[in-house]
Amino acid sequence: MIGMLRGTVWEIQSERLVLDVHGTGYLLTVPHGLLAKAYPGLELVVYTHVVMREDDLSLYGFSSIEEKQLFLEMLSVSGIGPKAAISLLSTFGAVQIESAIASENLNLLTKVPGIGKKTAQRLILELKEKFKGHSSFSTEGESFSDPSSHAHSEAHQTLLALGFGLDEARQALGQVLKDGGDLTTEVQVKRALRLLSGSK
């Protein structure tokens, strides 16, 4: 099996990228956060997992061992396939998913396309014990007191839909929420956009 690849990004598609490894192009399905950072010519190390089915052979890539491990944990849950697991990682990232599962946050998990209430309940039931202690979410020293609130998740998804990367969206929202106040989704997005555009 292929556990890791190191090469150069050759091509970027809507949900996948082609990684050139010594002249061989590997087509990888990757989370949005990794895809947003990639560009042709970038030297990249990806941790991979092969999904084999009767009529399909697909290769999935991740930016860290931890992200890959979470993907595998989610695949172990009945009803969760590779597409749903990647969708979860693309929408919220590994840390926030683990936090949502540990805190039994159905509202957050069901915001992901393809994840219904029953599927989210299975994720929580089967994985919450593994993620105990992950109920707080922070990034680069910035903590969100209520990261899985409706307003924050909506603002985060809006920034992703506008084309911003997972990390830059997190950091901008982290700074906005750090300033305090009960902000609506619209205000969060507007302030985050000002930060991301470099204006004050």
Image (cartoon, grey):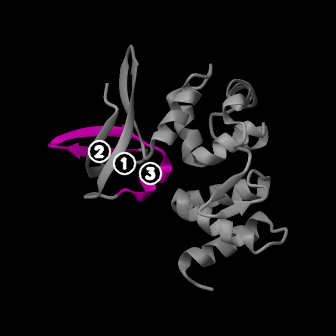
Which range is magenta? Answer: 16-38
- Amino acid type for the residue under numbered disc 1: Gln
| Marks 1,2: beta carbons within 8 A | yes
Image-quadrant location for residue 160? bottom right
Judging by the rendered image, the residue that carries numbered circle 1 is 13
For marks 1 and 2, the one nearer the N-term is 1
Comparing 200 with 179, the one in front is 179
Residue at disc 2, secondary structure = strand
For marks 3 and 2, the one nearer the N-term is 2
| Tag of residue 34 | 3
**What residue is shown at x 69% (from left), y 60% (from top)?**
155
- Count all numbered tags in the image, as a single digit: 3
For marks 1 and 3, the one nearer the N-term is 1
- Residue extending farthest to the left is 23
Q: Counting other residues with Cα less than 10 Å from the Cα at mark 2, is it few (<14), some (14-19), or many (20 or more)?
A: some
Judging by the rendered image, the residue that carries numbered circle 2 is 18
- Give the answer, above or below, for where 199 lies relative to 191: below
Q: Counting other residues with Cα less than 10 Å from the Cα at mark 3, is it few (<14), some (14-19), or many (20 or more)?
A: some
Quadrant of the snapshot with the N terminus: top left
- Residue extending farthest to the bottom is 200
**What residue is shown at x 75% (from left), y 28% (from top)?**
121
Is residue 165 in view? yes
Q: Is residue 50 magenta?
A: no
Quadrant of the snapshot with the C terminus: bottom right
Is residue 111 in view? no
